[in-house]
Amino acid sequence: AQSVTQLGSHVSVSEGALVLLRCNYSSSVPPYLFWYVQYPNQGLQLLLKYTSAATLVKGINGFEAEFKKSETSFHLTKPSAHMSDAAEYFCAVSVNRYSGGGADGLTFGKGTHLIIQP
Amino acid sequence: SQTIHQWPATLVQPVGSPLSLECTVEGTSNPNLYWYRQAAGRGLQLLFYSIGIDQISSEVPQNLSASRPQDRQFILSSKKLLLSDSGFYLCAWSVLRGPTSGANVLTFGAGSRLTVL
């Protein structure tokens, strides 16, 4: 079974500083990896996804993530934080177990709350 | 374009009362549908998923059940709520078909916040 670990339930950075949110995965087969963002009392919005086409993935709102197989990591970064980036961020993994049964959902990490200091 | 609707947005229910949360998807046919629960500090837990009408898979045995009476409608129910059922319930859909179809990208609804007192 696959799993995701997000290091740090809360991360605080200053406005304009680098954002780094850490995600490590565990999977016995090549995974698909995702980052989602959740603003207060809202659903989740897809930021970016890794599908093995390229190890550096660019997403919306200036975020990007790099897949590193040797480190089993998929950390999310943004060069310069903005106040509007304050939200909960979730890393997720899936492997297609579509063997005549079903389309399995994603396995999510516990989330990282990003706080932006003015 | 596809849209997903969840209601009610918020709900306060007493312990022991029934529950019905509804989710509908527009603009697509035969979607995969999912129910997740988000509890404080515990991330998102997959509760149920469905690949078709009346085809429901349960990921976690518990006090809840799900039904899919129509292609684009997914309902989460309980006969008697527990305090531990409180949380933020999220419905999602995807169109993944088969192991070679690529990543199973889920699109989420706005969620339903349930408080059990």
Image (cartoon, coloured by chain):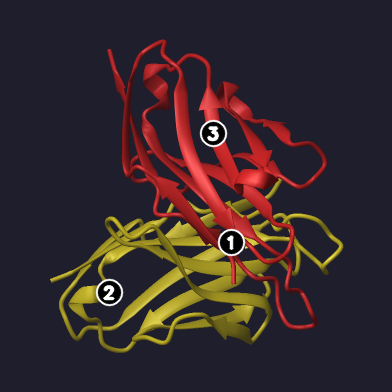
Hey, which residue is sitting farthest right in the picture? B100
Q: Measured from the top left, where is residue B33 in percent x and y?
A: 61, 68
Which quadrant: the N terminus of chain B? top right
Colour applied to chain A: red
Which amino acid type is shown beneath numbered disc 3?
Answer: Leu
- Camera-side mark, 3 or 2: 3
The chain to which mark 3 is attached is A
Callout 3–callout 2 Cβ contact below 8 Å: no
Which amino acid type is shown beneath numbered disc 2?
Answer: Asp
* Residue beneath the point at 40% across and 81% down: B77
Colour applied to chain B: yellow
Q: Which mark is residue B85?
A: 2
Q: On the rendered structure, is B34 left or right of B103?
A: left
The chain to which mark 1 is attached is A
The chain to which mark 2 is attached is B
Dot 3: few (<14), some (14–19), or many (≥20) neighbours within 10 Å?
many
Image quadrant in which you'd find residue A95: bottom right
* Disc 3 target residue: A76
Image quadrant in which you'd find residue B68: bottom right
How far apart in space, not on screen, are marks 3 and 1 (Cα)? 18 Å
Q: Is B30 drawn above or below residue A9 in the view shown? A: below
Q: On the rendered structure, is B45 left or right of B1?
A: left
Q: Is B32 drawn above or below residue A102 in the view shown? A: above
* Disc 1 target residue: A106
Which of the marked residues, 3 or 1, is nearer the chain's N terminus? Answer: 3
* Residue beneath the point at 27% across and 12% down: A118
Dot 3 lies on which element?
strand
